[in-house]
Each structure stands twice: as C-alpha cells, then as structure tokens.
Image (cartoon, rainbow, N blue to C red):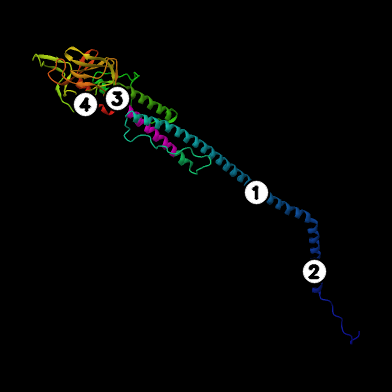
C-alpha cells in the first residue's frame, strides 16, 4: 500500500437517476408522438365529422330561410293578385252604381216634371265620379268598399224618399177626388204599406228593383193626376168674383117660392170670359130653354159641366177643349135676372154641388 497516491472519487448516484429520468421522458415522448401519428386519421375524421354536422346544420337553416322567403314572396304575389282582383271588382261595382244612379236621376227628373216634391231628399250628386281606372290601385281598399256601400245606401234611401213622396201625393189626390165622388183607376187593386226597414243578406232588393218600384209608384201617381186633371175642379170664370146664389134649395127669383138650384151663380158683368173647368168634349153649344145660351162639356166617366146664360158662345159641338180654355162670355140670356154665370156639375145625369169640386181644386192646385 502506497501512502503517497491519492484516492479516485466515485460518481454520485443522483446523476444516474437524472439520466434515467430524462431518458424515460424522451422515450415516453416518442411513444406518444408515434401513437399520435398512428391515430391522426381518426382524429381528423372526428374533426371532419364535427364540422360536417355543423355545416349540415347551417345548410339546413339556410334552406329553411330560403323556403320562408319563398313563402313570403308567394304570399306577397297572392296579396297583389287579390288586390288587383278586388280593384277589378270595385271598378265593376262603381260602374254599375253609376248606371243605377243615372236611372235614379231620370226617375227624379220625371217626378219633378210631374210635380212631386222630394223635400230635399232627391238622389242628386250621390255619385258624381265615373269608373275608376284599372291602373289606379289605392292602398285603402276597405275604405273604398265602405265609401261605395255608403253611396249605395244613400241612393237607396233617396229612392225610398222618392217612392214615399209619389205614394203620399197619389194618396192625397185619390182622397181629394173621392171627396167629390170620383174614384180614379190607378191600374191596380191591392194596397200595401209599412215603414221602410232596409233588408240584410241575400234577400235584400237591388237598387234596380227598388227603382222599378219607384217607377210603379210614379205610374200610379200619373194615373191619379190624369184623373185629377180631367175633373172639373177649376174656377170657371176669371178673376176674384163672388157667388150670388149657391147650390140647393132657395127662393125662386121669379116665383118667390122654394125651388131647387142645380148649380152656383157667379157675379160677372156682360162679356166676362168663361173658362172650361176641365178638359173635355163639347156636347152642347146653343140655346137650351131657361138656360139661355149654354155650353155643356163632357169630361168622361159620366161627369159633365154646364155654363148657362151666356152672352156669346165661342165653341161648337164635338170640339175638344182644354182646361181653362175660353168657351164664351157671360150674359143674361134665358131665365135670368141679370148678367152672371150659372155653373153646374152633373155626375151620371144628376146635379151635384159644384162648390165641392172647386174646393177640391184649390186643395189640390199644386198637382195641376
């Protein structure tokens, strides 16, 4: 044993432990890397599957949105089609209303010519516009529909007012003629009535039907008015003259005893024009006993009038005269005490009170 040589040191155990740890870590890393490389297609496939599902979801959503857009477009096109159809129907409806209004206007003019007053309810200017052009498409179709409905209702109510006016006027004339014993022929035998209540639903009459009913009412009024015109209800002498002797019992001016006076006497100086109380045909023109110079007019329906004690006669037998036409002049011929007009009305050969006819004429003068 040599004392002079130094001893060789031993390697520490911790260095070996560190070396093996690093080696094990590298080995594990390589294993994991190899395993990752081995499994990478599956991992990629997993990622692709996730992306495909998400893309499929997006594509499905896009498809749904496109379908919704198509539905909206289809609905819009349908609405435009409905609007065009509605506008076409509105144009047709307005054209029909315009034609109906022209018919109503013609009836109104006819009623006025016949002397019927609507008291401000005439259907004028109910519809003043013509047909709406097809190119004009208002946005407020419900408002247009409502306006047309109002227009139609106003026209209908005007027709009702016109019908009521004609019916009431006819009734007034008929009542006046009946008061003097005349029954006009109106061409019907039935009487109907009742307040006007607008109908609803399919049972409602059209404006044309109601206008035709008005035309019927005007025809009845025309028949009543013709009967009135032919009735001897006008004053037979011009001017405001008094009556010297009435109809009925009186003292005879020659015999001074009770007698029957078949007419009424109007005070009138010689030569005062005498007028026909109604249109008719001259059935007598000449001397007639105590009547002196006399004119008799046949008015039809058994009604005649006589104008007696005339100074002059200006018509001849068989001649047709109009209401108010001069038939002669007053005088004092025949059984008379002085110039005057003796006026008689006879129905079916029997003398009736002329004053009732003249009163009816004053009451119904607005229809003459």
Mark 3 Cα shell of 10 Å, populated few (<14), some (14-19), many (≥20):
some
Residue denoted by label 3: 171
What label sits on residue 22 in the rendered view?
Answer: 2
* Quadrant in which the N terminus appears: bottom right
| Magenta span | 147-173
Question: Is residue 312 among the parts visible in the rendering?
Answer: yes
Answer yes or no: do the residues labelled 4 and 1 have beta carbons within 8 Å? no
Image coordinates for residue 28, horizontal then vertical, percent: 79, 63
Answer yes or no: do the residues labelled 3 and 1 have beta carbons within 8 Å? no
Answer yes or no: do the residues labelled 4 and 3 have beta carbons within 8 Å? no
First reached walking from the N terminus: tag 1 or tag 2: 2
Mark 4–mark 3 distance (CA, rounded to whole Å): 30 Å
Mark 2 Cα shell of 10 Å, populated few (<14), some (14-19), many (≥20):
few
Answer yes or no: do the residues labelled 1 and 2 have beta carbons within 8 Å? no
Front tag of 2 and 3:
3
Mark 1–mark 2 distance (CA, rounded to whole Å): 55 Å
Residue denoted by label 1: 62
Counting labels gives: 4
Question: For this rendering, which residue is in front, 62 or 214?
Answer: 214
First reached walking from the N terminus: tag 2 or tag 3: 2
Image coordinates for residue 230, horizontal then vertical, percent: 29, 21
Looking at the rendered structure, the secondary structure element under dot 1 is helix
Front tag of 4 and 3:
4
* Quadrant in which the C terminus appears: top left
Mark 2–mark 3 distance (CA, rounded to whole Å): 132 Å
Mark 4 Cα shell of 10 Å, populated few (<14), some (14-19), many (≥20):
few
């Amino acid at each position: 044993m040599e004392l002079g040589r130094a001893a060789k040191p031993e390697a520490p155990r911790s260095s070996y432990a560190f070396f093996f740890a690093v080696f094990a870590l590298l080995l594990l890393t390589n294993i994991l890397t190899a395993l990752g490389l081995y499994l990478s297609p599956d991992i990629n496939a997993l990622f692709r599957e996730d992306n495909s599902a998400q893309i499929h979801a997006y594509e499905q959503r896009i498809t749904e949105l496109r379908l919704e857009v198509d539905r909206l477009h289809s609905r819009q096109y349908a609405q435009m089609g409905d609007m065009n159809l509605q506008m076409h129907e509105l144009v047709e409806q307005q054209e029909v209303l315009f034609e109906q209004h022209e018919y109503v206007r013609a009836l109104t003019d006819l009623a006025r010519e016949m002397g019927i007053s609507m008291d401000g309810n005439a259907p004028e200017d109910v519809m003043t516009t013509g047909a709406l052009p097809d190119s004009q498409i208002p946005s407020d179709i419900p408002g247009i529909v409502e306006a047309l409905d109002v227009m139609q209702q106003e026209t209908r109510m005007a027709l009702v007012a016109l019908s009521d006016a004609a019916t009431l006027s006819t009734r007034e004339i008929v009542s006046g003629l009946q008061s003097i014993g005349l029954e006009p022929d109106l061409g019907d035998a039935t009487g109907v009535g009742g307040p006007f209540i607008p109908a609803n639903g399919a049972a409602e009459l059209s404006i044309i039907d109601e206008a035709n009913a008005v035309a019927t009412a005007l025809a009845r009024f025309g028949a009543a008015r013709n009967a009135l015109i032919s009735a001897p209800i006008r004053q037979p002498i011009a001017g405001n003259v008094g009556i010297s002797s009435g109809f009925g019992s009186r003292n005879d001016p020659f015999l001074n005893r009770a007698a029957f006076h078949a007419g009424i006497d109007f005070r009138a100086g010689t030569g005062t024009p005498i007028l026909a109380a109604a249109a008719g045909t001259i059935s007598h023109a000449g001397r007639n006993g105590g009547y002196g110079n006399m004119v008799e007019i046949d008015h039809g329906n058994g009604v005649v009038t006589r104008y007696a004690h005339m100074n002059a006669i200006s018509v001849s037998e068989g001649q047709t005269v109009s209401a108010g036409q001069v038939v002669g002049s007053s005088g004092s011929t025949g059984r008379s005490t002085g110039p005057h007009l003796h006026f008689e009305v006879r129905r079916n050969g029997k003398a009736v009170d002329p004053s009732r006819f003249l009163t009816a004429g004053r009451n119904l003068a607005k229809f003459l």
